[in-house]
Each structure stands twice: as structure tokens, then as C-alpha cells.
Amino acid sequence: MENTLILLKPDCVQRRLIGRIISRFEDKALTIVAMKMIQVTPELAKQHYAEHVEKPFYPALEEFITGAPVVAMVLEGLDAIRVVREMLGKTSGLQADPGTIRGDFSSSRQMNLVHASDGAEAAAREIDLYFDTSDLCRYTPALTPWFRAGDE
């Protein structure tokens, strides 16, 4: 099993797409093991986007991510990081394929609705920024045998 951090960004929250996006993850048999709505502070934004803080676009990014609440989630599943990123589609909604979350709901590079960790190391770092270990509620959904074989 693999974990990934998901942020339903301010544009997702403001556009009232939270339920529709969560449903797509659940439909793919990914398990939500932690979830909360928070207001990202400038300090948290700087930690999350540390690699971008010195770049010219960072002030606009910080203004965007702190502009409204986000829903932070930890999803768990087989190959979850890759699966989620493929479900999201390309960063720009204008370039994302139809059928992907961004392809279906976004028409912007920045207002692209969802952040997802891009690798295992990033997922571990990002999950630690938003959640304490005690926040993670690991369980086996009753439907698991109907989603995948026992040896997967």
C-alpha cells in the first residue's frame, strides 16, 4: 500500500466540487485514511512550496493557496501516487485529457483544483506537514475483496 497527500485547493472548494472529486477517488478504490478542512497559512505555504519560494511566481501562488480553505486528505491504495496523478491529468486543465479531473473541470494552469504528491519522498514530507501520525485512520474497507485480488 502507498500513501499520497491530496489537497483540494481553494478553487475546488469555492466551486463546490469537493464531493465530486472525492467520489472519483473512492470510485477508483482509493481509501481515505485522513481528511480535514484547513486554512493554509503563509508559513505552511512556504513549507509546502519550499522549492518555489524564491521564484517570481511564488507570491501569486501563496496568495492563491491561502485565499480560501483547502481539504487535505491522505489517500491509500496500490500504486496510489501514480494512480492519482494519472487521474488528475496534466497540470494545465487546458492540456489535460478529457476524463481526467483537470480535463473535465479545469481550464487553467494554476486553478487546477487538486494538488497530489509527485513521489514517495514528497508524499511523506507533505503528509507530515498536514497531519500527525495519530490523525491517520488505517482500516480495510469491507469491499476490498471486490476491488482487487488478495495477492495484489
Image (cartoon, rainbow, N blue to C red):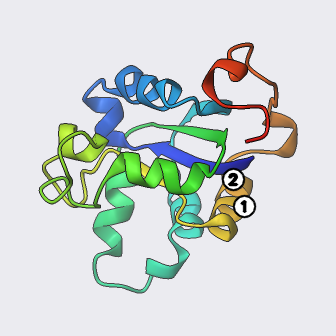
Label 2 sits on what residue type?
A: Ile
Identify the secondary structure beneath mark 2. helix
Q: Position of residue 86 (x, y in %)?
A: 40, 53
Q: Tell me what residue is drawn at x 50 percent, y 31 percent.
A: 28
In the foreground, 110 or 57: 110
Which label is found at residue 1?
Answer: none
Question: What is the residue that sits farthest to the top in this orientation?
Answer: 142
In the foreground, 103 or 125: 103
Residue 83 can be seen in this image: yes
| Left or right: where 1 falls relative to 29 | right
Residue 66 can be seen in this image: no
Q: Tell me what residue is drawn at x 39 percent, y 26 percent.
A: 18
Label 1 sits on what residue type?
A: Ala
Q: Write down the residue under mark 2.
A: 127
Whole-number angstrom distance, CA of label 2 to CA of label 1: 5 Å
- Quadrant location of residue 148? top right
Residue contact between numbered discs 2 and 1, judged by CB atoms under 8 Å = yes
**Label 1: how many Cα within 10 Å (few below 14, some 14–19, many 20+):** some
Which label is found at residue 124?
Answer: 1
Q: Tell me what residue is drawn at x 44 percent, y 79 percent.
A: 52
- Quadrant location of residue 19? top left
Identify the secondary structure beneath mark 1. helix
Q: Position of residue 142 (x, y in %)?
A: 74, 13
Q: Tell me what residue is drawn at x 32 percent, y 54 percent.
A: 64
